[in-house]
Image: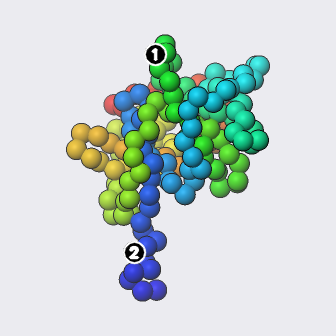
């Protein structure tokens, strides 16, 4: 393999989002789009972290509130969210409600570090690593582990506290 090919394998684009005070990143190759103002159909008896079902141009998918999954309080009254439509490796689409959407960042694998033990347990469980940017720590989220955590938490109870230590 040539050096250029090897270099391309190590480069990844991430969409940055904010949940509470925490910045997170989703791999762009798993992000279908970002939407706002979607009508949500509530699912009776569903867990608090499931906002409901959304219909996006004929595709019905589950919308999850990332704040709830990681144990943060509700958004302030009147604050809107952005919904990141992601595709898991199994091919299923989910909507992940986040507080804000930032930018698309191009990163080399050498730019990020292993997940520090100082992160809250829930972030450590879904993290592929972190990117330190001055005072900001961007958690690179493994979408499949995040969805699996949501399903597991729905069956076993509430997640650990999501505040950074």
User: Tag 2: Cα neighbours inside 10 Å, few (<14), some, or many (≥20)?
Assistant: few
Residue at the location (50% across, 24% down)? 80
What residue is shown with label 2?
A: 7
Residue at the location (29% across, 48% down)? 132
* Horizontal relation, residue 33 to residue 5: left or right: right
- Which circle's residue, 1 or 2, is located before the other in the chain? 2
Residue at the location (32% across, 59% down)? 111
Alpha carbon distance from label 1 to label 2: 43 Å
- Residue 91 placed where, x, y %? 70, 53
Q: Nearer the viewer, mark 1 or mark 2?
A: 1
Give the quarter of the image for residue 60.
top right
What residue is shown with label 1?
A: 76
- Residue 107 placed where, x, y %? 37, 59
User: Tag 1: Cα neighbours inside 10 Å, few (<14), some, or many (≥20)?
Assistant: few
Vertical relation: 150 (above or below) 93: above
Answer yes or no: is residue 113 visible: yes
Q: Which residue is farthest top?
A: 77
Viewer-closest of 77 and 130:
77
């Amino acid at each position: 393999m040539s050096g250029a090919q090897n270099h391309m394998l190590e480069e990844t684009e991430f969409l940055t989002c904010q949940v509470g005070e925490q910045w997170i990143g989703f791999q762009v190759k798993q992000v279908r789009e970002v939407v706002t103002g979607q009508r949500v159909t509530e699912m009776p008896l569903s867990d608090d972290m499931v906002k409901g079902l959304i219909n996006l141009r004929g595709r019905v998918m589950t919308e999850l509130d990332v704040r709830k999954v990681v144990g943060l309080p509700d958004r302030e009254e009147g604050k809107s969210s952005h919904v990141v439509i992601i595709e898991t490796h199994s091919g299923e689409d989910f909507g992940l409600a986040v507080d804000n959407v930032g930018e698309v960042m191009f990163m080399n694998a050498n730019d990020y570090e292993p997940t520090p033990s100082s992160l809250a347990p829930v972030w450590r469980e879904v993290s592929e690593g972190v990117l330190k940017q001055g005072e900001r720590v961007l958690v690179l989220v493994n979408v499949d582990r995040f969805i699996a955590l949501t399903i597991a938490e729905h069956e076993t109870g509430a997640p650990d506290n999501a505040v950074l230590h």
